[in-house]
């Protein structure tokens, strides 16, 4: 397996030709797509991966400077696309990975035919008239919470935190087996994510995009989804009845149906000034 | 007391309500549909206000709420449960209660989530302990990192340290060498001066007593005298190097001094060397012995001239300068940081290499051919400047030339006018029968001095030590002048004697003499104000002039 595919724990399966690449958001790993991919694997070539420091990626490849902005993560997405020679792919990004997909599509548009953006936000912190949903001190509160809870979070984090290479079984025995994260990298990713501001990038997108907006989503409120829709040229907007931030987990059927409708619709990109 | 058997066994409700943990049931969107009393007590809410109206995640701190949405819920959806996830509850009174959450998701027959059962444990103490652990781990990591870094740079640091140490040792060695040479030369010069004083005196005596017509003998005596004077000049320079020459520092205007030397310098330099003087404006005054500064500048000029046998340019510059702490810190022979008056003498000559530069201030070190130089010029400069609390620095490049910079301390807070150059040729003046007490522990010198003074027309009393002198003072109230060596044998030095005599005979003038001094009268070679000194070897004429002026009350 190539270095890139190993680094990001890339998994490829499915019986179709059209690539469909799934990017998990902050706090999760590729497991979060487990209820969605079965609906597409007959017709698509499914590509799953873990961001650096998440899941079974190679945490040693993490470099704080390289991943100092979302562009570093977009680099990885493009590297995976190049490695697998993907073009005209469907990119499905959750939460912060929606914006990572946007950045990747701006840089190499030929790679992506459609973007499915689930709970996207171009900026989480309020700014003048712009409502992101958070104040800066809220984000500081999150970072502090993560800091003070690395050990409390132990059932998830233990394999990393205990740093006990002589006893790997300690990690395996733990009950919360999904979404393992390196705490330092996770904190860095949280900072990069919640302090990001990619509003200026939205008008540069040429790829057809779908915005999936949940109800009562504290992370990406409806106002943010509307802003995305207004500023992302030719985007489509679907309001889900699913609540929370992870409709792919809490309401997979509704999410799949919305995706199917969008992917079936051959409507070309609308011209937007 | 008789109790109902049933009341001894706790009911399920009792267990539920008063368990040492919080129990909650919520809908998949978080809405609380049941809570036990323990939880209500923790959070400070009534059941009716909470149940059906509030989402569990809305009771969390902002950070915990984000964590709930991004981590906890996805985990719960994927694996059906979560164990021991840390979250912070915000209570109605504003307190934050750290808890550990266990959650189970119950679904319908199709696996669709219906309800969450949540168990919460108060984790206040555990969280504190975890925080301590985390800090300890961070500290351990930092220490490891630091250790690693130290190890990686160990070799480099050892090399640096050794180089630094070697440099300091080299500087110390250089300073010690100069000090040792200084002691040696100072000692030799002192003894020589005593001998020269006797030789000079006796030649003068011969010259005066030789019968008329004995021209050949007169010529011989004159040659002997000239050679003796040259020897005296040499010992003077040796003393200068050893920083033991008696200095008479006065406020001086260095610009004026340099300007006054220009004729002398031009004559010294000859026609092939062009002299340029660049005198700094607003130059501070300094405090130094003007005669010795002239000597120093002349020595530097002669050296520069000799470095330019085919001609060149000699530049003398003056300027105000500041030596900062960083500069003086690294000097082998430190001076205090502060303001200095700079005299820089530069030539366009052959320059010198590093080995030469290191030895150039040593007495008798010379690069000139045998017979061309004494090797005492720069050592005089060095000794004089150091003794004047100044600093001297050489900059030289082979083939490019040399600059020697002399820094003299700025004189602060004195309105005294700069001294004019002292008269060079004291007039021969005679005594008028005044009584002089001569105190000198060296018998030959004492004999010479007393004979010279008697010859000059004075009445002379003599003593070999301080106590003898005091006895004589007691018996002879007619004494007009005390003439004493600074260093005396027998426990009382010249200064102590002078103090005692002044106590008994206030106003009695005192004239000191010395080969070199490092004692009470002269602090580090400097005369105290109002004290008078005649350096050895002194000539008959110098003695005559000095004594006369002391007696006349004309002390300058």
Image (spheres, rainbow, N blue to C red):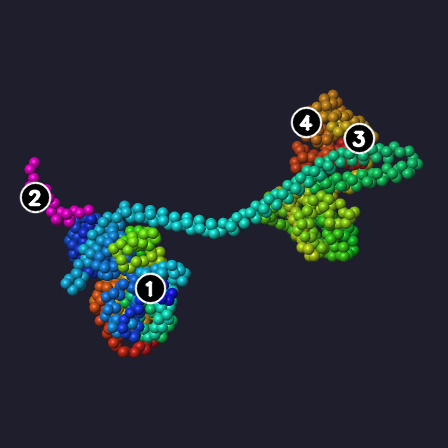
Chain letter belonging to callout 2 = B
Labels 2 and 4 positioned on one and the same chain: yes
- Mark 1 — residue? A9
B534 or B492: nearer the viewer: B492
- Mark 4 — residue? B492
B457 or A101: nearer the viewer: A101
Q: Is residue B453 above or below residue B128?
A: above
Residue at horizontal 28%, vertical 62%? A219
Q: How would you rate the neighbour count of disc 3 (Cα within 10 Å): few for under 14, some for 14-19, many for 20 or more?
A: some
- Mark 2 — residue? B6
A156 or B503: nearer the viewer: A156
Return the disc, 2 or 4, that comes first in the chain's sequence.
2
Return the disc, 3 or 4, that comes first in the chain's sequence.
3
Q: Is residue B257 above or below residue B212?
A: below
Extreme residue in the top direction: B475
Residue at horizontal 10%, vertical 44%? B9
Q: Is residue B234 above or below residue A185?
A: above
Q: Position of residue B407 (x, y in %)?
A: 65, 47
Chain letter belonging to callout 4 = B
Labels 2 and 3 positioned on one and the same chain: yes
Q: CA distance from mark 2 to mark 1?
A: 60 Å
Q: CA distance from mark 2 to mark 4?
A: 115 Å
SS at mark 1 in the image: loop
- Mark 3 — residue? B448
Q: CA distance from mark 3 to mark 4?
A: 22 Å
Which range of residues does the magenta coloring cover?
B1-20
């Amino acid at each position: 397996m190539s270095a890139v595919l190993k680094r990001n724990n890339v998994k490829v399966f499915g019986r179709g030709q059209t690539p469909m690449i799934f990017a998990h958001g902050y706090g999760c790993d590729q497991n979060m797509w487990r209820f969605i991919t079965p609906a597409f694997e007959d017709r698509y070539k499914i590509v799953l991966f873990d961001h650096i420091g998440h899941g079974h990626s190679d945490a040693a490849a993490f470099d704080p400077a390289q991943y100092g902005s979302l562009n570093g993560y977009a680099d990885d997405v493009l590297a995976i696309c190049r490695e697998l020679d993907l073009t005209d792919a469907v990119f499905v990004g959750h939460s912060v990975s929606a914006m990572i997909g946007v950045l990747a599509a701006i840089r190499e548009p030929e790679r992506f035919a459609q973007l499915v953006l689930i709970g996207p936000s171009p900026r989480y912190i309020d700014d003048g008239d712009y409502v992101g949903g958070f104040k800066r001190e809220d984000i500081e509160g999150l970072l502090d919470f993560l800091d003070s809870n690395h050990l409390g979070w132990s059932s998830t984090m233990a394999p990393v935190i205990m740093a006990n290479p002589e006893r790997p079984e300690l990690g395996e025995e733990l009950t919360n087996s999904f979404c393992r994260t390196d705490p330092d990298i996770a904190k860095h990713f949280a900072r990069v994510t919640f302090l990001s501001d990619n509003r200026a990038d939205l008008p540069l997108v040429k790829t057809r995009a779908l915005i999936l907006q949940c109800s009562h989503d504290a992370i990406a409120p409806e106002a943010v989804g509307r802003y995305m829709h207004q500023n992302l040229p030719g985007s489509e907007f679907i309001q889900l009845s699913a609540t929370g931030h992870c409709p792919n987990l809490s309401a997979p059927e509704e999410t799949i149906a919305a995706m199917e409708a969008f992917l079936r619709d051959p409507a070309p990109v609308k011209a937007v000034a | 007391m008789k109790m109902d058997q049933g009341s001894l066994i706790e009911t399920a409700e009792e267990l539920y309500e008063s368990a040492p943990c919080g129990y909650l049931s919520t809908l998949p969107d978080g809405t609380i549909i049941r809570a036990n009393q323990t939880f209500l007590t923790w959070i400070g809410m009534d059941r009716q206000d909470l149940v059906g109206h509030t989402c569990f995640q809305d009771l969390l701190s902002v950070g915990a709420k984000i964590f709930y949405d991004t981590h906890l819920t996805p985990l719960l959806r994927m694996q059906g449960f979560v164990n021991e996830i840390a979250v912070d509850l915000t209570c109605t009174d504003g307190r934050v209660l750290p808890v550990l959450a266990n959650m189970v998701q119950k679904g319908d027959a199709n696996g669709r989530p219906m309800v969450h059962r949540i168990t919460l444990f108060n984790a206040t103490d555990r969280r504190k302990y975890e925080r301590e652990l985390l800090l300890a781990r961070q500290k351990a990591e930092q220490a490891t990192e630091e250790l690693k870094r130290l190890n990686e740079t160990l070799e480099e640091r050892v090399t640096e340290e050794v180089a630094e140490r070697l440099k300091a040792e080299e500087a110390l060695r250089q300073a010690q060498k100069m000090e040792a040479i200084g002691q040696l030369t100072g000692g030799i010069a002192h003894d020589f001066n005593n001998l020269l004083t006797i030789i000079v005196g006796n030649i003068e005596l011969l010259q005066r007593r030789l019968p008329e017509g004995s021209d050949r003998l007169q010529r011989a005596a004159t040659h002997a005298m000239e050679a003796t004077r040259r020897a005296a000049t040499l010992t003077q320079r040796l003393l200068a190097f050893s920083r033991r020459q008696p200095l008479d520092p006065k406020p001086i205007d260095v610009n004026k001094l340099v300007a006054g030397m220009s004729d002398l310098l031009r004559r010294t330099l000859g026609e092939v060397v062009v002299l340029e003087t660049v005198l700094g404006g607003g130059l501070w005054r300094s405090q130094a012995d003007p005669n010795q500064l002239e000597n120093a500048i002349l020595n530097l000029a002669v050296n520069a001239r000799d470095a330019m046998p085919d001609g060149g340019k000699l530049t003398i510059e003056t300027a105000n300068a500041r030596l900062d702490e960083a500069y003086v810190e690294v000097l082998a022979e430190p001076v205090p940081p502060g303001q200095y008056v700079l005299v820089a003498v530069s030539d366009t000559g052959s320059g010198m290499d590093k080995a030469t530069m290191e030895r150039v201030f040593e007495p008798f070190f010379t690069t000139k051919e045998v017979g061309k130089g004494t090797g005492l010029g720069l050592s005089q400069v060095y000794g004089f400047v150091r003794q004047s609390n100044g600093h001297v620095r050489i900059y030289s490049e082979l083939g490019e030339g040399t600059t020697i910079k002399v820094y003299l301390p700025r004189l602060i807070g004195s309105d005294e006018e700069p001294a004019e150059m002292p008269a060079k040729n004291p007039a021969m003046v005679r005594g008028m029968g005044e009584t002089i007490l001569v105190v000198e522990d060296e018998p030959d010198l004492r004999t010479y001095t007393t004979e010279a003074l008697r010859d000059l027309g004075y009445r002379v009393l003599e003593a070999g030590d301080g106590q003898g002198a005091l006895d004589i003072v007691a018996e002879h109230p007619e004494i007009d002048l005390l003439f004493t060596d600074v260093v005396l044998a027998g426990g009382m030095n010249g200064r102590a004697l002078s103090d005692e005599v002044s106590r008994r005979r206030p106003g009695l003038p005192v004239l000191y003499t010395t080969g070199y001094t490092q004692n009470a009268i002269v602090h580090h070679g400097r005369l105290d104000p109002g004290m008078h000194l005649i350096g050895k070897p002194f000539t008959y004429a110098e003695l005559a002039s000095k004594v006369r002026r002391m007696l006349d009350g004309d002390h300058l």
